[in-house]
Amino acid sequence: MSHPRILVARSVFPEVIARLEQHFDVTSNQPDETWSKAQLIEKLQGKDGAFTTGGERIDAEVLAACPTLKICANMAVGYNNFDIDAMTAAGVLATNTPDVLTETTADFGFALLMATARRITESEHFLRAGKWGKWSFDMFAGSDIHGSTLGILGMGRIGQGIARRGAHGFGMKVIYHNRSRLDAAQEAGCKASYVSKEELLRSADHLVLVLPYSPASHHSIGAAELALMKPTATLINIARGGIVDDAALALALREKRIAAAGLDVFEGEPRVHPDLLTLSNVVLTPHIASASVPTRLAMANLAADNLIAYFRDKKPLTPLNPAALASR
Ligand code: DGY
């Protein structure tokens, strides 16, 4: 019997390609070419499954043009590149990679918070530029992390990981806002108190965004929300581009209406709003929150496991739209 045919849309670990080749007829993109939508559709012709990485848009147009497709396994926990309703209607299963990246991403959120509040990258650029002539009392004086108020918008697994680090590691007071409130045991586990979004914005010394992107969360932080924040506050976005209005943020940072921002994700990435690039009070990283070697390998293997399990017995590990299984 011939193997199912799958497309791996981006370059991934060679050992994961080798694993997939034991189960599938694999077309890979190890040169990591950037494909247009038309090229993606062309590459998907005749394929039964796809290994995607969060950047490949799978929508009604792609699905209509690729009728043999049965599953798309995202190597990412976020899946805003998938039109889930269209996939379910077309009977195409979607999977993602929850859990395996939670702690690594929470580590990074905290690292970005510390780099931003303590002005680490800004001061390093100063030193490397040969500008350090003498010590001074207020040189790169930032804001404290220990004992401050940590605000978290979006309290899923990663948000709770950040809350635990803040509460237990740094003695921070943790407040959060989320679509649904955690139960009492979860709140106690990360010593977090539920507040309204307005109170979160007004009270946080450091506000970390960890909510999923959807049309409903588009520009959750814009000019009006930034205006509520403390002038000494820092804002950290490790969620998705589009959750923050980057133009409004750049203006607020330029006018020092908030102290600083740390951004790992951007509207329209890999493009970055040009105004952000000119500011010294923002730390910019290229969407690397989950990028430790063990975690990226675990994510790739979980995406592969989903493909293998789907074609073996229709029991994927982390399905997003199990209703799609019923129609196959
Ligand atoms: C995720 O898993 O959603 C991360 O942002 C990596 O893409």
Image: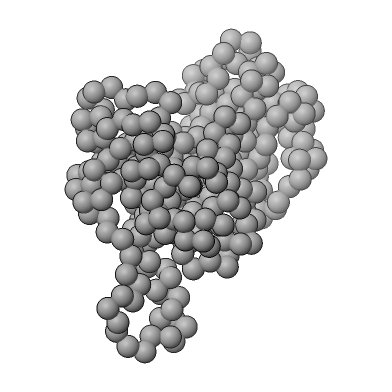
Residue at (33, 65) in percent of width and height: 142
Q: Find residue 97 and report its horizontal and vertical position in percent.
A: 47, 35
In the displayed image of the protein, which residue is found farthest to the bottom? 133
Taking 141 as reference, is 75 left or right?
right
Observer able to see residue 276 = yes
Q: Quadrant of residue 232?
A: bottom left
**Residue 192 point in image, percent of width and height:** 26, 35
x, y percent for residue 291: 45, 52
Above or below — where is 213 with respect to 29? above
Residue at image coords 67%, 36%: 57
Is residue 195 shown left or right of residue 253? left
Front-lying residue, 158 or 20: 158
Residue at position x 25%, y 50% in the image: 148
Q: Identify whether 21 is placed above or below 205.
A: above
Q: Nearer the viewer, residue 156 or 247?
A: 247
Please say if 33 is above or below 83.
Answer: below
Q: Position of residue 25 (x, y in %)?
A: 65, 35
Quarter in which the N terminus is drawn: top right
195 left or right, relative to 42: left
Residue occupying the far top of the picture: 326
Q: Is residue 153 above or below residue 146?
A: above
Which residue is painted at 57% across and 13% down in the image? 323
Q: Is residue 81 left or right of residue 231?
A: right
In this rendered view, identify the residue nearer to me: 106 or 172. 172
